[in-house]
Image (cartoon, rainbow, N blue to C red):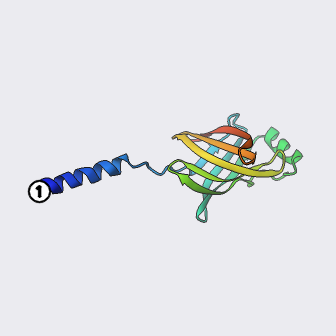
Amino acid sequence: MNFWIVGALFLATSAAQAAPRNEVVNGVWQNPSGSVKMRIAPCGTQICGKVVYANAQAKADAARGGNPDFIGVNLLRDFNRTGPASWSGQVFVPDINRTVSGTLTKSSPRSLTVRGCVVGRVGCRDQVWTKVG
């Protein structure tokens, strides 16, 4: 009888270790050029990403797109978890003042791929953001 209990505990422990861990993306991330930083944090039951830093060029690009007050703008809106390391929601593109469908994929502890697509899976663009700090 003890053999069955030990065996069951071993299988339960192995299954728990093999289960994918739900990744967390909270924190500050910067775009590839370092010109924009956003803080990803919970917003209700979802996650959002708000601009906390932008250099002069990024601010000017956003202003030309119709967003003169770029700091504080939510770039990532209404993201819901779709897998252990993936989310889907809306990506705001300030340069063109447009919101597109998007996904987030955490590929490593310090890398986050942000993908925005204009229509479905057409007109997509990826950016790999890096964790700050």
Q: Residue at x 62, y 41 (%)?
A: 113
Label 1, residues with CA under 10 Å away: few <14, some 14-19, many ≥20: few
**Residue 105 position within the rendered picture, expressed as x and y whole percent measured from the top left:** 58, 44
Residue 5's image quarter?
bottom left
Residue 39 lies left or right of residue 1; in this view the side is: right
- Residue placed under numbered mark 1 in the picture: 2
Inspect the image, locate mark 1, and give the three-letter code of the amino acid beneath it. Answer: Asn
**Residue at image location 75% in from the left, 42% down from the top:** 122
Give the residue at the far left of this rendering: 1
Quick one: 133 or 106, which is closer to the camera? 106
- In this image, 67 relative to 132: left or right? right
Where is residue 13? Give x, y as percent. Answer: 28, 51
At mark 1, the secondary structure is helix
- Extreme-top residue of the structure: 33
Residue at horizontal 65 percent and vertical 43 percent from the top: 114
Residue at x 26% of width, y 51% of height: 11
Regarding residue 122, the answer to whether it shows in the image is yes
